[in-house]
Image: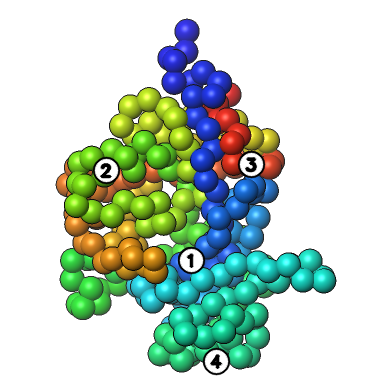
Amino acid sequence: MEPARWRAGAFQVWRLFRYPVKSMRGMMAEQLMVQEDGARWDRAYGVLDTAANTILSAKSEGRLLQAAAFFALDRGGSSLVVRLPERAPMTPGPMLDEALSAFLGRPCRLVAVSEYGQGTYEAIEDFEHEDERARRRFSGPPTRFVDSSHLHVLSLASLETMAKQRPDLDWRVERFRPNIVLSGGEGPTPELELIGRRVRVGGAEIEITGPCRRCVVTTRAQPGGIERQLDVLRHLNGEHEATIGVRARVLAPGRVAVGDVAVCC
């Protein structure tokens, strides 16, 4: 007999997010169309450092988190819009590329993964000593500007557990940039119990492939009062093997909506 936590309704979709431009703030959604390689329009664009030939990430360029990207409806359907601090919203093109270059202090342009292809990224080796600027390079999958996995799944229970352990820190969900946030489950970090399992969530089927190891991005400041807090990652490193949430790959595409149940297949 399966444990009680696998019964229908034990997990429920609480929030959904997509991030149209890698490492910029994203948008909450009532539903996501989950495709074979992840959520539609998630990390579909990136900011290319044209001198270094890398796609910029908040792992090495934290200022990206001060920008936002979303889709606005127009007569032709929907258009990507980027909002930089103290600038009017802009759509892709030379004016946005010029503004991005000025904002980040280096020559940049916005690129679509569908045209650019596989991205190469840089990450800071030691989040405690960013000024030393030791970096490593790595490449991601070819169809999205993600580091490795199709989807990132996080539970409210895990955030609540961290908040109980370190109530002095800010554990808002925005720090962790998930695609799917689940309520329910049993235990302090219930999504970890799903590792290795196939999960039906809404109309999609996913496989939970492993824990999500965290990096400097979780410590960075974000708009809305989220302050720079190195102790967030220090706590995860010391007490939770640097993990919170899980990574997933898509087995069967489908639509996922807020309120859908998530059950093991």
Numbered circle sitting on residue 239: none
Amino acid type at mark 3:
Val
Left or right: residue 3 compared with residue 114 = left
Amino acid type at mark 1:
Arg
Numbered circle sitting on residue 25: 1
Q: Which badge, 1 or 4, is on the more N-terminal residue? A: 1
Disc 4 and disc 3 in contact, CB within 8 angstroms: no
User: Residue extending furthest top?
Assistant: 1
Q: CA distance from mark 2 to mark 4?
A: 41 Å
Q: CA distance from mark 2 to mark 3?
A: 27 Å
User: Quick one: label 4, few (<14), some, or many (20+) residues within 10 Å?
Assistant: some
Q: Which badge, 4 or 3, is on the more N-terminal residue? A: 4
The quadrant holding residue 144 is: bottom right
| x then y, percent, for residue 225 | 33, 65
Amino acid type at mark 2:
Met
Residue at image point 59% right, 36% down: 259
Disc 2 and disc 4 in contact, CB within 8 angstroms: no
Q: CA distance from mark 2 to mark 1?
A: 22 Å
